[in-house]
Image (cartoon, rainbow, N blue to C red):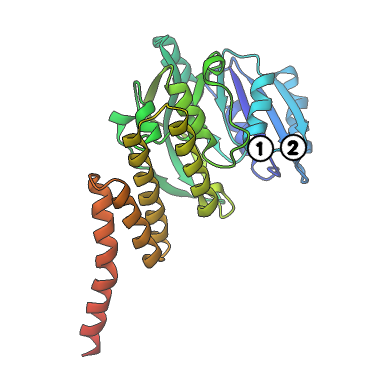
């Protein structure tokens, strides 16, 4: 088992990530830390663990090239049959590796395993869990990954290194959605297994990718176009995927109070995929929200 830990200016969180690896019930692992041009104390933190772990930890420093390139560097240096990903600001629960290896051993057709996460904030306080539809998360689910009915969260992912021979590596030209891109390519050739258990803490912070909506949208649209143009997905699947993207963008805008922009995003979702009940529901909900507020304000003014 090779655990790939990309790190960029991660000195504050890296010890929590590494300690969660050391606490695993499964012990046949190596750690590959890829320092992607950090300017903080990341090198020193990694060095202190290198002294304790010896050859069980590789430390690689490279000029800053971005997250996909850092992960690829780590995977190329990995010796394990299985690859597990742990970003430097995330944390594993103690049975995360054991559960993944069990799922792989139980089904040789499984190429990728994933599970549930609990979201935490920058201080480590619990935010909550993502709602999931398990029926879309196991089996031959490339269609669901592409159309965004399946969301696979990186700190729970484990896959066979041999899958990279057919699926390829992380696309280093992408600066968002590169994880979904690889999961999709793996799922085109292998079965995916979902473990319905929380196995990691996924940290959200103001500087995280999920908070940069424009960058995220650009990556999502590129992913959809890339695989439609390659012939891997149909026109209908493309429209379904675009509808999901704009509905999720609308959700983020709506939660942030940008109701007018949210309505525009929901409208695009409906135009792309009018048969989706969530798209239609969220569009009318967003329209109704300011109307309800205006009516309430008028009542109070009387």
- Viewer-closest of 188 and 9: 188
Residue at the image position 37 percent from the left and 66 percent from the top: 259
Rendered position, 175 above or below 165: below
Q: Position of residue 28 (x, y in %)?
A: 59, 14
Closer to the camera in the image, 37 or 25: 37
Where residue 110 is drawn, which disc sits there? none
Look at the picture and state if 116 lies above or below 25. Answer: below
Could one spot residue 95 in this view of the protein? no
Quadrant that contains the N terminus: top right
Left or right: 143, with 199 as reference point: left
Q: What residue does disc 1 label?
A: 15
Q: Residue 45's mark?
A: 2
The residue drawn where x is 56% and y is 14% is: 165
Total labels drawn: 2
Tell me residue 67's x, y (percent).
Answer: 63, 37
What residue is drawn where x is 50% and y is 32%? 181
Disc 2, SS: helix
Q: Is residue 141 left or right of residue 22?
A: left
Q: Which residue is pictured at 42% across the width and 21% down the height?
A: 188
Q: Quadrant of the C terminus?
A: bottom left
From the viewer's perspective, is 50 left or right of 26?
right
Q: Are marks 1 and 2 in contact (CB under 8 Å)?
A: yes
Q: CA distance from mark 1 to mark 2?
A: 7 Å
In the rendered image, which quarter is residue 9 located in? top right
Q: Position of residue 120 (x, y in %)?
A: 49, 47
């Amino acid at each position: 088992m090779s655990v790939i830990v990309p790190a960029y200016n991660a000195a504050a969180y890296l010890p929590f990530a590494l300690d969660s690896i050391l606490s695993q019930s499964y012990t046949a692992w190596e750690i590959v830390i890829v320092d992607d041009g950090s300017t903080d104390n990341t090198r020193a933190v990694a060095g202190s663990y290198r002294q304790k772990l010896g050859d069980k930890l590789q430390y690689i420093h490279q000029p800053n090239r971005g997250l996909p390139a850092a992960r690829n560097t780590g995977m190329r240096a990995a010796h394990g049959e299985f690859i597990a990903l742990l970003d430097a600001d995330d944390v594993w629960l103690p049975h995360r590796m054991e559960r993944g290896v069990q799922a792989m051993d139980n089904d040789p057709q499984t190429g990728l395993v994933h599970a549930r996460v609990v979201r935490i904030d920058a201080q480590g306080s619990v935010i909550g869990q993502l709602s999931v539809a398990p029926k879309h998360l196991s089996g031959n689910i490339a269609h669901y990954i592409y159309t965004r009915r399946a969301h696979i969260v990186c700190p729970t992912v484990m896959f066979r290194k041999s899958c990279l021979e057919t699926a390829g590596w992380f696309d280093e030209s992408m600066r968002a959605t590169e994880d979904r891109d690889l999961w999709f390519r793996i799922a085109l050739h292998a079965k995916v297994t979902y473990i319905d258990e929380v196995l990691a803490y996924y940290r959200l912070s103001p500087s995280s990718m999920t908070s940069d909506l424009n960058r995220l949208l650009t990556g999502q649209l590129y992913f959809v176009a890339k695989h439609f143009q390659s012939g891997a997905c149909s026109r209908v699947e493309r429209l379904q995927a675009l509808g999901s993207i704009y509905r999720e963008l609308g959700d983020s805008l709506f939660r942030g109070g940008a109701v007018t922009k949210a309505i525009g995003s929901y409208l695009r979702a409906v135009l792309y995929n009018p048969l989706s009940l969530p798209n239609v529901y969220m569009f009318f909900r967003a329209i109704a929200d300011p109307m309800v507020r205006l009516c309430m304000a008028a009542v109070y003014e009387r």
